[in-house]
Image (cartoon, rainbow, N blue to C red):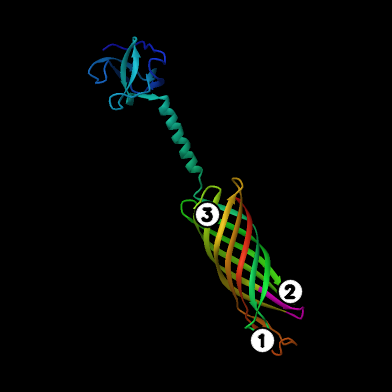
Amino acid sequence: MKLVGFLFILSSYVFSAQWATVIKDQAVVYSDQQMTSEIGYVKRGKKIRVGEVARNRGTLLPIIVNEKIAYIKIKDIKTATDEKLVVSAVARKREVKKSKKEESRIGLSYTRFLSQVETLQDSTQTEDFAFNGGALKGYLKNNYKSTSYGAEIGYMTSTDEEEVNKFELYYLNFDVMFRLVDFQNMQLSLFTGISLIPLSQYSYDDLFTANSAGYGGYGGAELYLGINKSIGLHARAQYTYIDLIGYDIPKSEIVGVDAKYEPNLSGISFTGAITYEF
């Protein structure tokens, strides 16, 4: 067997060609596709020009030797196409590594809570209150699952039309979200959660102020829109129910004896938020 010392490359009009590097110590060159006749070999590291159309069930590529078509095993060489595929695969792996398992966001929100509240004078009567408030809000999204989690600490307040009754609520919300639609810059989720009210104050026409606490629950839907890679907008609508444990109302002209005021808050709330991924 003689050493193939010179490979003459036909121009691309003969057959579509590409550069390849020999990766075997001695890559055998065959005169036919059935590999019955060996006409030489090429040493490791040699750059050769080979065709792009594989032969013999994808095991051979054609090359030109002494102005004649010969064949070399694909497994003995590495083509430029292979290198591109490797680079592409490495890039994809790096991209996967860059993709976080969890995505954290923090931001500010504004809430308008339209609620009916039992009156102090008659628990069978209700009065409409429109609460306004803000909160510091956080999200934790699991990119490998369809669930996300939210938490917020906030404050809201409202007075009646006569500006006699005033409520103030300091609250903590914790919710779990289930994404129905999940695109990179748009998500639609259903959620449910619990509310803890560590402190609530009720005042009546500056005559007195009473403190209370409470708890509740809520559920609804949220739409998320990503402005860019870091900043996003959130809009949600939900039904909320809050049970206040009770205000100790002192004796006054309004209430003849000491009493306990235990109102419930229920209604629809709308929230808008802007968050930042960190």
In the rendered image, the vertical position of residue 255 relative to residue 87, given as above or below? below
- Whole-Å distance between the Cαs marked 3 and 2? 41 Å
Residue under numbered circle 3: 141
Q: Magenta region, mostly helix, strand or loop?
A: strand
Provide the residue span drawn in magenta.
200-208
Q: Secondary structure at mark 1?
A: strand
Choose top left, top right, bottom left or bottom right for residue 49.
Answer: top left
Q: Residue 264 vs residue 10: left or right? A: right
How packed mark 1 is, by other alpha carbons closer than 10 Å (few <14, some 14-19, many 20 or more), is some
Disc number placed over residue 161 in the picture, else none: 2
Residue under numbered circle 1: 259
Q: Earlier in the sequence, mark 1 or mark 3?
A: 3
- Tell me, yes or no, if residue 278 can be seen here: no
Which image quarter holds the N terminus?
top left
Query: Which amino acid type corresponds to the residue marked 3 in the rendered image?
Result: Lys
Camera-side mark, 2 or 1: 2
How packed mark 3 is, by other alpha carbons closer than 10 Å (few <14, some 14-19, many 20 or more), is many
Choose top left, top right, bottom left or bottom right for residue 195.
Answer: bottom right
Of all residues, the one furthest to the bottom in this rendering is 256
Q: Residue 9 vs residue 136: left or right? A: left
Q: Secondary structure at mark 3?
A: strand
- Whole-Å distance between the Cαs marked 2 and 1? 24 Å
- Tell me, yes or no, if residue 227 can be seen here: yes
Choose top left, top right, bottom left or bottom right for residue 9.
Answer: top left
Q: Position of residue 221 (x, y in %)?
A: 55, 61
| Front one among 55 and 48 | 55
